[in-house]
Amino acid sequence: MALIALAADKGAPGVTTAAVALGAVWPRPVLVAECDQAGGDLVYRLPSAQPDGDADGGMLNPSRGLLSLAATARRGLRPDQVAEHCQRLDGGLDVLVGVTNAEQAHAMTWLWGPLGRAFAGLAPVDVIADCGRLGAASPLLDLMHEADLVVLLTRATLEQVAHLRERVAALTAELRGGPPVGVLVLADPRDFRGSIAEVDRILAGVRGRASDAAQGPPPPDVTVLGGLALDPKGADLLSGSWGGRLDRSLLIRSAREVAADLTGRLPAAPPAGHPAAPPAREDVPLPPGPAEQPPQGPPPPRQAPHVPAGGGHEEGRR
């Protein structure tokens, strides 16, 4: 139904962490797709749903996901093909596992545009695409052109915001006529509002830069959407079962607020009993995502996926 592309510039802001955290509290059916060209991490970090009653769960299959989908999509890619290559995490979150290395991604540059259109055609499922770190003229721009919203993440440090400022200027020029661009700030809870306001101030100077360039479609709007809490303890709790401590963590509380804000900016979900999508888009029998819930209500009545905390690695998982 809606496609949200999450990405970052230089640094280690935790794009994958944000994607999975948002997916866990998303108030509509959702699929988290690993589209990071550097290679995905889900298969190494998260167990799949318990197979055949096995109490210990199992590993995600690295061969089933983006790689297997690409192998079947040479003659075209339809939305109804995506479901065949998805897996479910222990806890109920549906994922499309990415490639395991950059060499595999290099051979799949043709896929991103068709994949973005297929994601946009999933109904009534939203897709959160983890696009990892962007570079100059990234092939993932083809996917982003199909998105309803592009969200860039940054930490509230001088060097990361400086890199983000230049990336925003370049990205808005490349996405002329495309989706709006939002910014999420990963900030210390002790100065949450101040950090978000400072990032907003710094980015204000580049918002009109692309509009001064050559004639053509207008550049997308750029908005600082808010922030996710830098909460290592909350991330640690995400490696276990959903409980009261996790629900009260700053990470989950901030993720729930961001999820509610983002869904409010997206096309409305079709009412019950109403056709899930316009005729041009095909329904896909994906397993349902997290149960719908009011934005300010309790978490879904299920376990969160087991997500190891990220330590010093870029994508400290949920």
Image: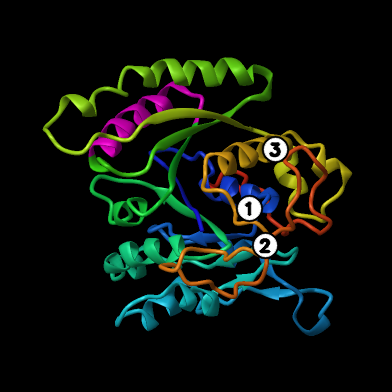
Up/down of 240 relative to 216, above or below? below
Expressed as whole percent of the image width and height from the top left, the position of residue 151 reads 46, 40
Check residue 100 for magenta coloring. Answer: no
The reply to whether discs 2 and 1 touch (Cβ–Cβ < 8 Å) is yes
Expressed as whole percent of the image width and height from the top left, the position of residue 139 reads 28, 56
For residue 125, which quarter of the picture? Answer: bottom right
Up/down of 293 relative to 50, above or below? above
| Amino acid at circle 3 | Leu
The residue that appears at 75% across and 56% down in the rendered structure is 304
Q: Which mark is residue 23?
A: 1
| Residue carrying label 2 | 289
Looking at the rendered image, the disc whose residue lies closer to the viewer, 2 or 3, is 2
* Mark found first going from the N terminus, 2 or 1: 1
Q: Which mark is residue 56?
A: none
| Residue carrying label 3 | 251
Q: In the picture provided, is 76 more to the left or to the right than 49?
A: left
| Amino acid at circle 2 | Gly
Q: Which residues are drawn in magenta?
A: 155-173
Task: State the CA–CA distance, disc 2 to disc 3.
Answer: 20 Å
Q: Nearer the viewer, residue 230 or 267?
A: 267
Up/down of 12 relative to 274, above or below? above
Q: Nearer the viewer, residue 248 or 125?
A: 125
The residue that appears at 24% across and 42% down in the rendered structure is 174
Residue 118 can be seen, yes or no: yes
Q: Secondary structure at mark 2?
A: loop
The residue that appears at 38% across and 63% down in the rendered structure is 117
Residue 318 can be seen, yes or no: no
Looking at the rendered image, the disc whose residue lies closer to the viewer, 2 or 1, is 2
